[in-house]
Structures are given as structure tokens and as C-alpha cells.
Image (spheres, rainbow, N blue to C red):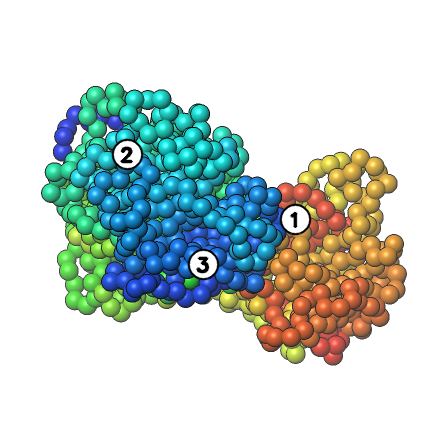
Amino acid sequence: MFRSLSFVAALAVAAATLVPQAAAQAGPVADPLPAPAPSGVGVRLQEIARLPQSSTTPAAGDSRLKQYNRINYLGEIPDGSGRFFVPDMNGKMYTLNRDGSGQRTYLDVRSAIGANFHNHQGLGSGFGFVAFHPRFATNGKFYTAHTEAKDALKNRTPDLPSPNSVVHGVITEWTASNPRATTFSGTHRELLRIGFAMYLHGFQEIGFGPDDLLYLAVGDGGIGYRSDVPQDVKVPQGKILRIDPAGTNSGNKKYGIPPSNPFLGKPGALAELYAIGMRDPYRFSWDSAGTRKMLLGHIGEKVVESVYEVKPGANLGWGQREGHLTYRRDDPKCQLYPLPADDAKFGYTYPVAGFDHNRPGGGCGDSGNALIGGFVYRGTAIPSLQGKYVHGEGVKGLLYYADEKDMRAGAPIAKTFELAVYDSAGKRTTMQSLAGKSRVDLRFGTDAAGELYVLAKANGKIWKVTGTVQTQQACDSGNDVVSGVTGAGDWKTVSPSRWRFPGNEVVLSKAGAVRPGPKRPNEYAVVTKGPEFGNVTVDAQVRLDTPVSQKDRDVVIVFGYQSDTRFYYAHLSSDNKIYPHNGIFLVDNADRVRIDDQWNGSVGAAPAVTDMKWHRVRISHCADTGAIAVYVDGSSQPLMTATNTVLKSGRVGFGSFDNVGRVADLRITGKAASVQAEASPEVSPGIASAVVHHYDFEHPATDAKKEDDIGRADARTPISLINGGAAMRVQDGAFPASRTSLQLKQVRPNDKTNDDWKAGVYGSSGVASMKAFTKARGMSIMTWVKITGEAPARNSNSSENSDLYGAIGIAGVLSGDSDGHAARALLETENHDGAMRLIALGRRLDGGDKQFFVAKADWKTLLPLNKWVFLTGTFDFDNGTIGLYIDGKAVEGSYAVKGDPWKIIGAPEPDVTSATDPRGIKIGGSHPQNNREANACNCRLDGLMFLDRAVSADEVREQYEWVTAGRR
């Protein structure tokens, strides 16, 4: 029985703390919001473009303005052309094609405005934004925001109250004479001019809403921290305005006031106002589905970064509130305070999501944190992001999301999760690495289909979000288990006198002392029972026995242990504000190094242990990829994550730095690092080094419903025997040295069920142990096959008994984007030109075209009923060839697709498969994740092998002769 608070109860407590409410005490709030939690999900980014380098004029003194360029948004022109637009705050608007090609300058705003154009002071200065009219295709209209200074301050008068202005923000309407033209030609007119008292927080975004009205996000001019400007309805600063560019009933007669504006008719209030009480409103968007709510990112002054649901007339409270807390101008430490008891009477709108940036002991100044608003994902390419509001932290380039369904004004603040970042090859990285600088200046964009893009001013690049990666999934977890380790003989301790073994738990009863050598846990014990583990999952109950009233209490779980100075450990602490506490660490013959993703320099993940109760802990370490995750108290979301590949294997342990505690119910499940696959006598010497995965169906895994892989030790990929389990192994060897084969069959041909006997493995983010087929120049599939029943099988998805499947699935390697059907290499029969044929199918690139080698002879001649046949397919992706063999002899046939379906003509060379791990193996039909039936095979397989190159015809013949001669 688990000795811990239920996860549901824990969530209820956490949720309650996120509801803005008055508090009894008046002291500062130490931790306003929880740190974004690891999501267990990463986004894969594909670079599509780099825009030209640019600079301010004159050169800026502020280093933050000295980026490669200042691109700050990507959108799609609403004319059906598929053109993207990207504004660069230094003055130009670029257009480009979807794939990043065709870059050109569409409009040079700086040149059009002239000498008054201002872009060298203030992070928001310059060509701030552009919004295309929804009917641009017919009216040619779009709108820009830019800043002006110099003579404009003397010769031009703001249209709305703007005392003590040092810079003007200007909204301009442009009308293209030909909306389809590749560069702008036409007219422009000024709609609105507003002054600002400082060089920051001006027009931060403009955009059309679902009502076809133009919304203007207007910052507070940098003075809201010391003035009432954001709350003053007589001035436009610190507000969202809403205007009708086609109207004329405004004060300057250049735009219209929508009659539904919430402040229209209120004494002393500007009619343009839509919402008030803002500091730095940075990026708004509307959910394109569901409630179509307006969401606004808002950069805070002191501690809290917020996202708001903005309704007409909303007051976000800035000047009096920051986020969901009370702001005090006179606080010397720039801290925030609980809400007053009478807060409800003010009617403020509070955030629906957000995060904080705690400064140790308070502290004022630029913290280097800025929430960048984004979009609710409603595209179709990435189902796992559906309904998630993707946003980020701009300076460091961190990506976050919150669930839209939880983001409701007046409801508890939605939990924020962090998204890991992967490059196009599927390698874990960071935006700082991709951007090449510590200051990323992250921004977001979206196309007409709702797909997401990220931009970085640091290097002027744009990436498309092309998919997600389950950060802890694509790993062969293994089937080796060690448990019941409660005796002294099961452990090796640093100091035996400090430990007790009462029988049902292991107790560290005396605190350890600092030892010579690297900084590392003072006292721990390592499990000696069983093997060392590579990929491993550690499940345990841990308890801290030192009173938590004493500061900085901890226990640690050790994994990857190789020696006293080489191991990983997870530090589970009551404190998360100093470097050695509450994180994931590596000891590698030197002082421990912190490697977790959550540490931001001053605070880490939420404290893991805050009491003296039992807590359930799970640690997952995928040595194949370096992915590490720590889960606490049954949460489905990891508390801590890291990626590190230094240690590939080791043992597991428990301990502490200088406290006492205990561990119980320890279970270690994983892949024994010491197990090496023997060279199989069933493989000819000529191809032995190329065999990656090998299944002879005589090696059940610990779970008999799985078959072990006797191929390469470092690529072991057990497969599931789906729906039939161990009964699928039958006494019918295909060749003299074999005893057992695998029976595949359709169980109920006439029923729409999901019970076909088939086999395979599937990982929605790729199977890491199959990396041999990632960026591969070639591959081969070899297997013995015997047709044992109706073929092709009846289509169980159809009500017509006479309806047969159009294919018989034999065996294949899935592509890196497969839903369980699409394959990178496949042997099957398929209907071609009106007749069923034996084929070998190859697909070099994920989502790319397939090539088929189609056998000329009738398939039943090649694969006769109840007769074993040795079938081989070879796939040379570099040279564009496929080979098909029966019993060691080449099969006559032809290619089905003319031209260059694999796109191998021209650079680069060599031609290889996509840089994605295959999503698995399918055997006897599609969908090894067993979510549907397709192309069942009433057949048996034996001696199934997947090889990492296209073997030669001679090697195919030699393998056939090797096994049929019965050599052992």
C-alpha cells in the first residue's frame, strides 16, 4: 500500500492555492505562482527561413536592440496566395513562401516614413506590427504600427491625450493598388497618433478580431509603476483600444468608434477603450474554436507574468494589481502582497495562466523574464497540442502551454507546463542553442491553417513546429526486474553503521558526514542484487525522518551508479532556492553538476518533500536518449526532467546528504546492461554484423506475451505478440535448426473487432532502439513465411463478407511519422493494376512518395499455401533500388512508380532516410498499437530479421543456404 497523500487530493489543494483571494496576513507573498511543470512533451522544430540582417538607425546603445534582426511575428496574408509576412522592427516587412523560399521586401516602412522614424531607443520602438485586413484580397488594405520622434514631436499633435511625450506611436493604413503584387505600390494615410512618456511600452500589437474591427494593444508608456495612467479612462495608455478603420466618427474623423465599445457614453472615458489596466500587453489572439475567447499575454513589472481572458470592459488592475496580487509602489524590495479583504468591490480581472520569476529576497530591476503571448493550437498536424495555448518566455526562449479549457476568467489559474525543444533530427536542444545566444527574443506566429511557428531575433531565424516528442516514451524500458531488496546482503553502504534493515524497509538511521573527494551525497547505499541497468525505471516509497522544521531537508535516489564518484542522483528536498537542492545531478569524477531543466539560476522545481510522510517516487532514465524524469506522488507529469548521456548504465541506490530517512517498496525495472545477445548460429557470417533485430520466436521475454530480440545487444527491441500472446508460438520450425514459429491470423473475419493475431512494437514519438534505421542508406528484411489460411483476409471493417483486404501485411519497419500503417520498408502482397502481387515497398522520407518493386509472377506461386518460403526484400535508398528474393533467388518484377519518388537526384549525398526514429515494427498487418485491424495475414513467420544495409544477392543466397543446410 502506498503511504502518500492521494494525487487527486494533492491537485485539489494545489488548485485552491491558485484562486485569487484575500488573505489574513499582510506580508509579501513569497511564491506567487508555481514554476511551470515539465509536460513530458517536446516540440520538434524545422527551420524554414532566416531573414536578412538589420540594425537600428542610428546604432543603439542598448545591447538588447543589437540582435541579428528584430523580426517579431509571422502571419499569412489573407488572400489565398499562401504568402507569409514578417515585420522587422528595424523597418522592413518581408514576404516569403511557406517553405521559406521567395523572400523579398514587400514594404520598407522606415524609408516611407522618413527621418522621423525612430527605432534605436526602447525595446518596442520601430516598425512594431502589421495587420492585414481580412478582406485584403479585394480591398488591398493593411495596417502598421511604428514609432516617431525628432520633428514629429514638434510638428505633429497626438489624436488622444498624451502628456509629456518623448515618442509617438502611429497607426497607418496602407492600400495596395494590386493586392497580388509581390511588392507594395499604393497609398497610405495616418489613422491615429498617440504619445508616450518613455521609450517603452507603446503600441505592442494591432490585429483584427472576429468582428473585423481593429484592436490596438497600447502599453503604459513605461510609467504605470508610478502613476495612475493605466486606470485613467481619460487617456489611451495602458489600454486595449478598438476602432473601425472604415468609420469616420472619431475625434479626428479618420476612423470609427464601434457602437458596442464598452466605455462609449461613460462620462470622461475615451470611446475607443475596450479594456484597461495594463502595463505591457504583449500579444493577443482569439481562440479560433470553442468560445473564441480573446487571450492576452501581459509582461509584469515585478514578479508575475500573466495571461488574461479579456472581455469587453475588463480591468486587469495594473497600477493597483500585478497578476492576481496587490502591487505597492512604495515597496523597496519590489514584492507583491495578498489581496485586500474588500477586493471584490473593484471588479478586477485576474489571470487565467501565468508564471513568476522569484528574485531571492525580493529585489527590483529588469529580471530578464517576459511572457510572450501565443495561440491556442487548432491546427491539424499536431493532435497532441490540440486545445493548448502555446506561449513562452521571450528572453531565454522557453516554450510553455496551458489547456484552453482551464483558462477561464474568474476560475482558478490554469497550470502551466513547459515544452521541451527538439531539432528537426529529433535531438534534444534548447532555443538558446538554436538561436546561438543566451538572449533569444522569442516570438510566435501562425499560418491560416493554425500551424505554429517560432521566431528568434537573436539569429533572425524562423522554425515551424512540425510535431511533438514524448520525452520519456521512445525508450525500450526492458523487462528485467529487481525487487524485494530489504536485507543487508542486498545493499552496499558507504558507512554500514549508519544503516538498519528491519525487514520491510531500509533505514538510514544516522546522518552522513562530508567525505573527501567531489561534492556528492554524504551517505547512501547501492543495490547489489541483480544486474546493472541501462534503461531503467525506479519505483519506491521514500520518507524523510529529519523534522522539516529544520531547514533544507533531503533524501536522494541514486541511479546510473558506476562508482563512488560516478553516478546520477535525484535530490528530493524541502527547499528549491539554492543550487544543490531539489534537482537532478551528475557526479562524474568531479563536484556534482546540476542538469535538470527546471533550475533557472535562482529557483527550481517545486519542493519534492515538505513533510515527514511517505511519498511515492518514480525515476525514469532512458540511457538510449539520456532522458531523465522524476515523478512524485503519482503525478502523470514529471516534477523534474533532464537530458544527459554521460552514464549509459549503472546501479540504483538511496541516501541523503546530511539527513536521515528510509525507503520501502523499491522495484527496479529495466534493461540489464550486462546482458549481451549471443551471435546466432542461424545467421550466416557474411550478414551477421548487419543484423539489428532478430526474432526466432524461441526466446520469450519475461512477459511471455512478448518476444525478445536476439539481435544487437545495444538495439534490443522486444515485440508484443498481440491478442494471442504465448499461444502464437507454434511447434512448426521453418528450417532444420528451428523448432518454433509465429502464428498470425484473423480471429473473427466477419466481425468488426480488434482481435487479429499480429505482432510488433509502436512508439508515437519513435522507438529509440531502432536508430539503425534513422538516416540509413539502406536496409533489408528477411523472414520465412508460410501462408496458412484465407488470403487475402476478409475486410473485418466491412459488412460485406465478400469484401477482402487489398493487401496482406507480412513484416515492415514503420516510418518516423507513421500512425501504425505507413512504412519505411515493407514486405507484403498488394493489389496492383487489378491483380494481387508480392511487393517490396520503400519510403525514404517521412510523408514522401513510396516506390514499389512488384513481382511479375502470381503471388500464390511465390507464396504457396502451407509451404515455407524464405522471403527477402532489400532497400538501397542511396542508389534508388529495391530487390525481392524468394528462397535465395531474385524475383523478376518491375518498379511501379516512374521518375524519382525517393527524391535522390542531386545534392546532398549520400541519400538517407529521414532523421527520425522509426515508430516501430509491424508484423502480420498494420497498427501494432492494436487500435484497429487492417491487412491481416493468415500465415506463420520464422527467423525474422531486420538489417541495417541493403545486402547483396549473393548474401541473400548464402543466408538461405546457411539455414537450409541446418548448420549449427
Residue 760 in sight here: no
Q: Is residue 857 visible?
A: yes
Along the polypeptide, which appears first: circle 3 or circle 1? 3
The one nearer the camera, 582 or 947, is 582
Say what secondary structure mark 2 lies in: loop
> Residue 926 appears at what percent x and percent y?
68, 50
Q: Secondary structure at mark 3?
A: strand
Q: Which residue is mark 3?
A: 108
Q: Which residue is mark 2?
A: 235
Left or right placement of residue 680 versus residue 377 in this view: right
Rendered location of residue 881, percent (x, y): 73, 72
| Residue at mark 3 to residue at mark 1: CA–CA distance | 53 Å
Res 632 → quadrant: top left
Q: Residue at x 31, y 41 (%)?
A: 158
**How crowded is the residue under tag 2: few (<14 C-alpha within 10 Å), some, or many (20+)?**
many
Q: What label does residue 927 carry, if any?
A: 1
Residues under labels 2 and 3: Cα distance?
Answer: 31 Å
Q: Position of residue 812 (x, y in %)?
A: 68, 59
Q: Which of pointers 2 and 3 lies earlier in the amino acid sequence? A: 3
Q: Residue at x 51, y 58 (%)?
A: 106
Q: CA distance from mark 2 to mark 1?
A: 61 Å
**Rendering coords of residue 888 (x, y %):** 78, 72
First in residue order: circle 2 vs circle 1: 2
Residues at circles 2 and 3 in contact by the CB criterion of under 8 Å: no
Amino acid identity at mark 3: Asp
* Amino acid type, label 1: His
Look at 35% across and 43% down and name the residue there. Answer: 193
> Which quadrant would residue 890 be assigned to in this image?
bottom right
